[in-house]
Amino acid sequence: MATVRPFHGLRFNGTAGRLEDLVAPPYDVLSPTERQDFAAKNPHNIVHLTLPEQRDDDRSKYIKYARSAAQLEEWRRDGSMATDEKPSFYRYSQTFLIEGGLSFTRTSLIVLLKVEPYEKGVVLPHEQTFPKHKEDRLRLLEATRSHLECIFGLYEDDDNSVHKLVAGASGQRIGDLTTPEDGIHQTLDRIDDPATTESIVRALSDKRLWIADGHHRYETALAFREAQRERDGLIPEDFMMMAVDSMTDPGLVLLPTHRILKSLPVSAEELRAKIAVHFEVTEAANSALMGRIEAESNVGKMAFGIALPGGNGFIASTTDVGAITDQIEGPSSPMLKALDVSVLHGFIFARLLGLTGLDFFGYTRIEEEAVHAVEQGSPASFLMNPPTVEDMRLIALNGEKMPQKSTYYYPKLLSGLVIWSLKDF
């Protein structure tokens, strides 16, 4: 099963600046403007590595990756970053609020994971990926020969024993900050006692790992390893960084990802009429949609909130999900077809509206953004409830994948707390 090991983490030290000015969200959630804002905080901010800029005078589109590699080496030479002496695990805790003011703390452990092809059943995916994103990450990995960001994985832990072991392990606090953008309190502890690290290795050795976030980077690491062909023994390319967490962690929060339509082939009245043939439709203010569909879900109904221009939309709900999934084309299992995201894409979008592909909508996890979009020109936004961790687990065990952007584990992992260079293997 999963092969994990402690590692010599490469981290910023005090000469680089305040940690708050050095870290950033992961590369794939930053807009160009946000990237510039983080880059301006400090010349050592991690985005200078994770999102290198293309310059007008670059002779090739690949120069930017070499620039990232050169920057990383410069930081090592000038002492801005240094490698921890002992092989370590890194306990990473995030304390945050969600809507309604509820506070949670999620505690994961940053490890080196031996990458395995999906067909071995050791590491399981649950979402489809975008090929163009993988090419970009592979170019960066090849140039820097470093894993600059963590991906996020989950393991089964029915008795919560592994989570308790990780949370209770003695460690040294090496990072403590509250990110001003979101108010999340983030701490990082180094765990380097050999007896403790060995006990964690043993506890995880019989686990499978579900990729919760970071499919593109995992598949990039797989391609990077496959390029090395067969080798005797373990080599650095066998491993990547992953933050792993227990499925029983009380701080594990999964949020929905809403869809904002860029175009709509029918009028709002025709949209409502088409949906009313198959769902129970009730009018609702756009601002009330999310609360209403959550309430519907709590009583066993599948429900979507459709926000429309003018301040009012409607709820589409049903208890007869089977009657709808029977009409979704394709080889997917009934379990996969019965997910909210599958019904939205496979039935409402494709069958009722004739909308297929990925170009006719955008994504947001923020309800207010979805609602605001229809007042700024979008013809409609579709709000939905998230899948559950159990949904993700079972879909992956069945060898299937959800549509892209089906899950959103909140909060995202910060980049820049620790990285791993293959030269430190």
Image (cartoon, rainbow, N blue to C red):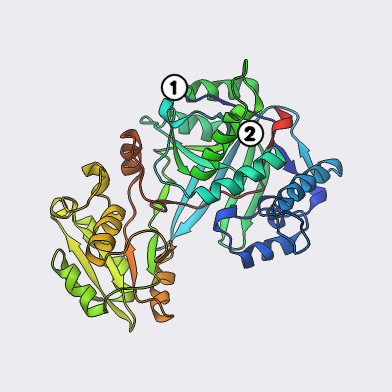
Residue underneath mark 2: 171
Does residue 327 appear to the left or right of 381 in the view shown?
Answer: left
Residue under the image location 22 percent in, 79 percent down = 269
- Residue 170: x and y in percent read 61, 31
Mark 1 belongs to which amino acid? Asp
Front-lying residue, 196 or 233:
233
- Say few, some or many: other residues with alpha carbon within 10 Å of mark 1 (under 14 / 14 to 19 / 20 or more): some
Outermost front residue:
59
Does residue 331 appear to the left or right of 386 in the view shown?
Answer: left
Residue under the image location 58 percent in, 33 percent down = 111
Q: Number of labelled discs?
A: 2
- Residue 360: x and y in percent read 39, 66
The secondary element bearing badge 2 is classed as loop
Q: Earlier in the sequence, mark 2 or mark 1?
A: 2
The secondary element bearing badge 1 is classed as loop
Residue underneath mark 1: 206
Quarter of the image for residue 180 reads: bottom right
